[in-house]
Amino acid sequence: MTTTLSDATVLIVDDEQSLADLYAYWIDEFAEAHTAYDGTEAIEKLDDGIDVMLLDRRMPGLSGDEVVEAVEERGLDVRIVMVTAVDPGFDIVDMGIDDYLIKPVDQPELVDTVERMVVRSSYDDQLQEKFQLVEKKVTLEAAKTPHELEESEEYAELTRRLEAVERELDSAVEEFDDTDFSVAFRELPDGGPIDSTEG
């Protein structure tokens, strides 16, 4: 299993070809990059050799959401990052994605995100689930008002799931050092690091 950025293979999916090519150019300095310019091509190129997929959400033909569903149906072990201009809704709680970035993104953010995804690939399913839930929680808290969060059943369920996973992982989390978490977690929107010990 790929655990270092230099060994990773990244598939960039965006119907805006110039943007997909730009992302590939950025990523190719650090890892192997491939492009697909629509959802159908993405599914054709997806296989066990792809470690991370950067996926546009709104595309003609197959949408990013449909590509995510196809990945789940095929049981592929790939970290999926939505890179999109579409503001996140509460529907992302149940999507099989690992992170959600709002365009525009720059090279450092994109490369850091890919590196986090590669690091996470070495973790077991339960710890990966915690990472997914935390990223979704951070994404929604940055995009929604406190009132919207309070009124959302999806957000409440996300919080419950995260608390349950954290309780189960309390003993395992203690085995990871601060370096692991500083690489695996992005910073919160206010610039502060996520507290990996919080339970």
Image (cartoon, rainbow, N blue to C red):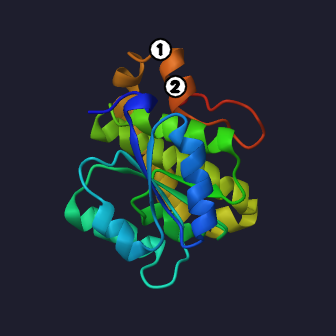
The image shows residue 13 at horizontal and vertical percentages of 48, 63
Q: Nearer the viewer, residue 22 or 150?
A: 22
Q: Amino acid at mark 2?
A: Phe
Observer able to see residue 173: yes
Q: Which residue occupies 72% across, 58% down? A: 104
The image shows residue 118 at horizontal and vertical percentages of 42, 36
Residue behind mark 1: 177
Is residue 193 depicted above or below 78 in this figure?
Answer: above
Q: Amino acid at mark 1?
A: Asp
Where the N terminus falls, by quadrant? top left
Q: Which residue occupies 67% across, 68% down? A: 85
Q: Which residue occupies 29% across, 68% down? A: 44
Observer able to see residue 197: no
- Which secondary structure, mark 2? helix
Measured Cα–Cα span from mark 2 to mark 1: 7 Å
Q: Which residue occupies 42% across, 18% down? A: 176
The image shows residue 110 at horizontal and vertical percentages of 60, 45
Residue behind mark 2: 181
- Asked if the residues shown at circle 2 and circle 1 are in contact, with their CB atoms under 8 angstroms apart, the answer is yes
Is residue 115 depicted above or below 43 in this figure?
Answer: above
Is residue 168 depicted above or below 158 in this figure?
Answer: above
